[in-house]
Image: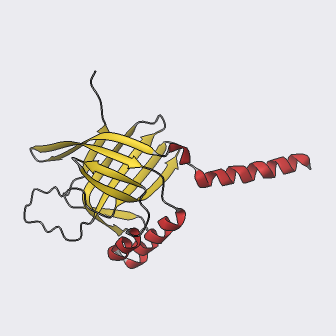
Amino acid sequence: MQAARVLVVAAVFLCGSGFVQGAEDYPLSLTMDANLTAGPTTVSSVVTIQVERLMSKSGLTRVSNELKFGGYTRFLNALRPLPVVGSVEVNGRKVDLRYANEQRSEAGRRLVLVSDQPLVFLSSDPDKNRTGYQLTIVELNFDAKGSVSGTMAGAARVKPSPDGSVVLDDYSGAPIKLTPRVTKP
């Protein structure tokens, strides 16, 4: 009987710990090199990413449902009043993050960050309309050893895919590649 109680307590503890999984990783501060190559041109800069915490489960459910059932505009309207969870900065321009969602696997973790404002418009077409590209999206992938790489869309919009996940529509047509910043001695 005592052993059964210990197992029940252990099971409750393990199930409950999944709710705060990843909390030990925040706040998170990263400085990364950002590179975009379009034809013969390469643009390079430094990106600073600050994540204070992940968004609440209720906030995540709200914005996901709005995108799935209401579309991009309703997603934006649900995203904008959410509390700030971090920021992304490039060349002195900074946007607040309102969406921070992490998925863990045996291989590591994937962190998706979204701001309700565009950070940069990069396009080889000077006549391209900027209307509707109102988000900045960062996707970071951490391997099991903690190494990180990722991509960023400085001006983007999203739409739901048939399977219910998010499909990125990037203004520039190519994502900005993010790699860890290497400092030279």
Choose between 18 and 51: the one closer to the eye: 51
x%, y% of residue 118?
Answer: 25, 61
Kindly identify the residue that appears in the image at 47 percent across and 34 percent down: 145
Q: Among all residues in the image, which is located at the extreme bottom? A: 70
Of 132 and 80, nearer the camera is 80
* Near-viewer residue (95 or 138): 95
Q: Quadrant of residue 123?
A: bottom left
Q: Looking at the picture, how far across and down is residue 107, in whole percent?
A: 49, 42
| Residue occupying the point 23% across, 70% down | 132
- The quarter of the picture where residue 100 lies is bottom left
Going 64% across and 50% down the picture, which residue do you hit?
17
Q: How many marks?
A: 0
Which residue is more in the foreground, 37 or 20?
A: 20
Q: Which colouring convention does the figure follow? A: secondary structure
Task: Find residue 64 and report its image quarter.
Answer: bottom left
Image quarter of the C terminus: top left
- Horizontally, residue 157 falls left or right of residue 164, namely left
Left or right of residue 67: residue 179? left
Residue farthest top in this picture:
185
Residue drawn at the location 21% of the way across and 53% of the way down: 174
Furthest-front residue in this view: 92
Q: Position of residue 161 (x, y in %)?
A: 37, 68
